[in-house]
Amino acid sequence: MSTNAVTLIANGDLRLAANQRCWPEQQKVERAIIRVIEAEGHQVVRAHEELPEKKHGFIDSQKRGRTVFRQIDPDNPLVIAFAAWQYSHHVLPGLSTHRGPILTVANWSGTWPGLVGMLNMNGCLTKAGVPYSTLWSDDFTDEKFRQGLRTWLETGSVAHDLSHVLPASELDFTDAESELGRRLAGELRRDKAIMGVFDEGCMGMYNAIIPDELLHPVGIFKERLSQSALYYEATRVSEEEAQACFEWLKDRGVRFRFGPDEDEHLTEAQVLQQCRMYIAVLRIADDFGCDLVGIQYQQGLKDLLPASDLAEGLLNNTERPPVYSRDGARELYPGTALPHFNEVDECAGLDALVTHRLWRALGYPPETTLHDLRWGEPYDGDFVWVFEISGAAPPAHFTGGYSGTSSERQPPMYFRLGGGTLKGISKPGEIIWSRVFAEDGRLKADVGRGTVVELPREETERRWRLTTSQWPIMHAVLHGVSRDQMMARHKSNHIQVAYAPDDDAARKALISKVAAFQNMGIETFVCGSHERAAS
């Protein structure tokens, strides 16, 4: 690159408390990155100052991002430093017209988390068609990071090993193995499905919105619903109905971690409101004939109701509290889950619907959910990922089911009105993981295999302390995919998971899913091994 000047920006959250809490860690990360860039003979210019009145230095809105980018030379090399969750749309307008090379950099830490924010930004840039490179490091002193940064500074790009990615069209699956996936894809295109969307664009996740013109050919059509309608419907649910739902959960063994202070602890009143939301979602979904639903989860609704996590996890579970029509005449969605895509991630929603229908046809437990690809470390010879989401995981995924489930208050920095999660430790077993994403104006999908492993309780607790202890956790080993390969390829902060009964069943499920995606017109890739079980 011709210039020695490198521009640095820090994109952040929309929520003031989150930005203030994460700012000290962001400062440490920026200082470390700046030291390495300067050691390579380049000057770093931070494009925006700290905001004394807000006590942080993040870009905290699209409005602020627009102002910052007006002062940036569009031909300068640009580094985006991540140590926290961020709303990608704050800076996407400026990045969309930036001509210089772009590098996203995150610290290898599960705390706030920068890795998750960076993966979301990478997915958004991929969908937007904006070229970028990406790097990550524990402390930015290792030679691999330094070499990658040096290459980017010299050439404007850095490549990673993607040898684990194989186009599914090159795999030799038989017609008999693929028949179920082909058939279900045809049924979906013929009969159509309705995706209920309670407001799009959660937390800046541009990559989580599927344009209608890409969604319609696969047979899925959006019913655009409003969080305002969800709030109103929740107010119509009676005290008796909410209490019955709450008692059902207690009878199944769910442990609620209550405390006396609404501002800091989970309370029974918060849980009853969450039960009302759960009932309201099913009634609205029934009104509109929805086959799956997603709740925006943050802006707007969080100021009216406790967090939606408990409702979301129940929706994703086959066994759940019964809900009846408003007149009490019939049970809604009896004997089945109503697939819910957390944070209204429509890519995960499409995936969840396909998985739900395939797994039911295969006779496998159909519960599915998305997790954040949060962080991970080696353990006993394997790299063990921490998959963790805010509470929307179904209890069927946990060791002990409902009796292995607890509910803890969401952190006040995110949810002023509280609300409980559905927290548990995912049971050991075989999983299929996947991600649908948009690139080059088309839908694509990555599919792979993994094994959920059981770690000693003290190791699980340590990992919870280093991430978010209120949330459900999955210890995952991916087959034939290294840590760095996963980071380099994955186009989202989210990863979709579903269990298969055993090794042979997992292979059959993967082939069926690949066949379904391909026959829906989704360009599909198999990542890692579809044959070999993890150690």
Image (cartoon, rainbow, N blue to C red):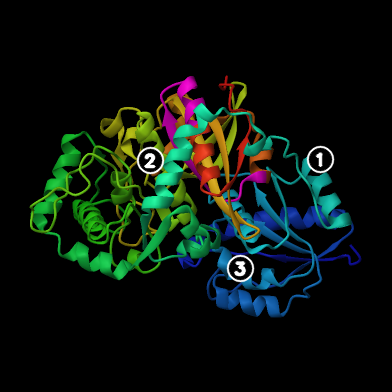
Q: Which residue is mark 3?
A: 57
Q: Position of residue 309 (x, y in %)?
A: 34, 51
In this rendering, the answer to whether 193 lies above or below 176 is: below
Amino acid at the residue labelled 1: Glu
Residue at image coords 49%, 21%: 503
- Boundaries of the magenta span: 489-510
**Residue 157 seen from this side:** yes
Q: Earlier in the sequence, mark 1 or mark 3?
A: 3
C-beta proximity under 8 Å, tags 2 and 1: no
Q: Quadrant of residue 468?
A: top left
Q: Quadrant of the C terminus?
A: top right
Mark whose residue sits in front, 1 or 3: 1
Q: Secondary structure at mark 1?
A: helix
Q: Which mark is residue 356?
A: 2
Question: Could you tell me the amino acid type at mark 3?
Answer: Gly
Q: Position of residue 302 (x, y in %)?
A: 34, 64
Q: Which mark is residue 143?
A: 1
Residue placed most toward the observer, 132 or 380:
132
Q: Secondary structure at mark 3?
A: loop
Above or below, 75 relative to 388: below
Question: Horizontal and vertical percent for residue 481?
Answer: 64, 33
